[in-house]
Structures are given as structure tokens and as C-alpha cells.
Amino acid sequence: MIGGGIGGLTLGLALRRHGLRAAIYEQAAELAEIGAAVALSANATRELERLGLGAALAAVSTEPTELIFRDGRSGARVAAHPVRDGGAYRGRFGAPYYGVHRADLQKVLSGGLAGEGLHLGHRLTGLDQRGDVMALTFANGVEIEADLVIGGDGVRSQVRRWITGGEAVRYSGTSAFRGVVPMGLLPSLPDPQAIQFWMGPDAHLLHYAIGGEADSVNFFAVVEGPETWTSERWLTGIREGEHLAGFSGWHPAVIEMIDALPQTQRWGLFVTDPLRRWHRGRAVLMGDSAHAMLPHHGQGANTTIEDAVTLAELLSGFSAASGTRDLDGMMRHYQDLRQQRTRTIQRSAWATNRLLHLADSVGAAMLAQRDARMARFPEDFSWIHAFDAQAAAREAEGDARAA
């Protein structure tokens, strides 16, 4: 496994549950997730609970009271849906919705794995297929051979380059400012424990409380532009006050949050175009390496966890079959199971970006249509949250055996 992030650690745990072992190679010298926090929906939390992490995850997470959509300038509620309140979300989907700091999630996952099979400080520099094995070379001089390479090494994946022959990463034309703010610095914020979207022309703000005590708020403020991204890094420096330019005239709670702590850089939002194939030879992709998407459904980490669980189920079946099925067929089966769902979520995230950023010039009728869609959010997007990756993989395996 290349990449020791959320996907790699989840895969290691899921494989171990089936009595299988994986070596995980991570380029960082220590586990440290980039980014502030992650929202985990039921399609992921149900899988983490199955891996025995439910109590540890709950201890470091906040379950939001509601999902609220607001007008970015007036602060008026456009639509609201209960989450923790009344047990609505758990009752509907059978698992919780959490806001959690990425570092805390990483600790929960790595704690479950207890370092088993994890190799830090290994940056992949080359891979090649030699007969039935993959030869891997790392920057520290280590060379190994593997029966199967799983690329969970992010948007700029080395494994994807080998599989597809190209980078296949694209700047979305949008960027973001982000941070974690202590709750005490946000006196103007209404409904502080809700997950909220503030919508307006060419920008939106998403935020939710995180931590076991709900004492901090993670925010993600997205704006259109810059038109091009020239930096080779995800981050670029900004001029003083640049983080507020897209939110002029917005509600005081928005300005207060974005400006609560010093902002010195902006994040470019990058995506992968849908890939025609996710595997080649003895290598296969998962997570952002295969389907990096805009974060407006909060599904990047969640679909990565789905990928990991699906791969573990299929590899378990392949191992149990003891040579009666070919590895290439197993990877085709994995791609068939995962490709359409992740492409649909990718497309929906793009459409959601447009809705959240509608300008006043589109007219009252279009804005009313947007508001009506936000009011239908649970009905329109329950297919994302209700999905059971383990059940889907097992059902597909049963169908394949029956055929």
C-alpha cells in the first residue's frame, strides 16, 4: 500500500479483520494529515464502527445538531435539517455524522493499527512490473517487490502516473481559506454546534464544530478564482486582507470566523478528471488517487474509506478462492463497483459549487429554485449517506459466485 493516510490505514485495518496483512509505505517521517478537519458521514462511520473504532472515534468527535443553509449576507436560514437533534440522522442512516480533527482521526486509525506493517519515510520514486510482481523503489534507497500495489498516495499520485501514463490532475478554478477557530472567538455565530453553509455570490463558507468537547470550529471558505494556478504546490501566499475580499458585505459571523486567526495562504482546489481505468498489471488505485473531488459534499475521506472496505472484501474473497479467480479480474470487479458511484458524487460536487455561488443577477426565480433544492437535501442526497460499502461488495461477490 502506497500512502499512509486515512485510506491506507483503513485498508490495513480492514484487511487485518480478514486475516490478511499489508505493508503500508508513507513518504512522511511521521503521520500528520494535511488540512484541518474532516466530516464523516454514515457511509464511513458505519465502516469504522465495524472495525472496532466507534468508541474511540466518538470520544474525539462532535455530532452536529443540525445542517443549516444560510444566506451569506443576511444570515437568514434558507433551510435546516436535524442531525443530532432528535436522533434524526442516526435514525435514518443507522450510523452517526461526525466532525473530527484530521489529526485525531489519524490517531484513532493508527492506534487501531498499532504500527503494524507501517513504514514511514518511504517516498515512492519508481515502480515497474516484472513478471507477476511489482518492483518498487523509494527515495531512501529501499527496493522491494510486491504481489499487488495499491495506490492511495493522493491527487498527485505516483501510482496513477504509472497506471494511466499521465498526471490527470486539474485545477478547479476555485480556492479556499481554512482554519480551526476556538469557539470563544466567535461571539456572533448562531447555532455554533450545527454544520452550516453560508451561500452568496461567487463564494461560500462551510463550518462545523469539532473535538470531543465541541470547543473549536473548523471552517472552509471557498471563492471563485484565481483564474489560473501557477504554483506547483497546493498552497500559495496571499496579500494582507485578501482572504476577506470575496466576502465583502457578508454577515458579521462570517467575517469574524474567517478573520479570527491570521491568514497567510490559500488552498488551490484540484480534482482528477474521471479515469477510464483504475488499474494496470499488478497495481490499482483508491481514494483521491482515483477520484479526487471538490469537497462540497464532504465525501473525499468518506469515499476513500468506502474504497478501502471494498478492496478488503474483494481481496479476502480472492485469497479464499486460492487461485480460482485471476487478480486482474478482481481489480476489474473493484473498478466496476466503485467507478460509477464516485463519478456521480464528483459531478454532484461540481453542481453544488455552482448552486452555492449563485450571483444575484441570476434572478429571484433561480435563487428560489436553489433554496428549494436545499430544503430537499436529505431526500436528494440520502443515497450518499445510506450506502453500505461492505454489503455492496458482499452482494456483488455473491452474484459473481452464483454466475
Image: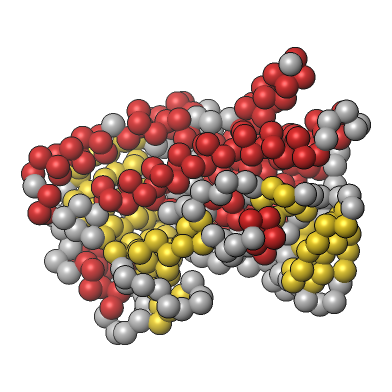
Residue at point 39%, 47% (across, down): 349
Indicate whether 360 appears above or below 364: below
Residue 162 in percent (x, y) is at 69, 60
Q: Quarter-wise, where is residue 126 in the image?
A: bottom right
Residue 288 versus residue 39: which sits nearer the camera? 288
356 relative position to 213: left or right: left
Indicate whether 114 appears above or below 158: above
Residue 110 in percent (x, y) is at 72, 56
Counting every numbered tag in the picture gives 0
Residue at point 36%, 72% (across, down): 228
396 relative position to 22: left or right: left
Residue 364 in percent (x, y) is at 8, 44
Visible in this render: residue 180?
yes
> Furthest-bottom residue in view?
239
Residue at point 47%, 35% (across, down): 384
Q: Quadrant of the C terminus?
A: top right
Q: Quadrant of the N terminus?
A: bottom right
Indicate whether 251 appears above or below 340: below
Residue 72 in percent (x, y) is at 20, 56
Display coloring = secondary structure
Residue at point 14%, 42% (across, down): 366
Residue 218 versus residue 393: which sits nearer the camera? 393
Visible in this render: residue 61?
no
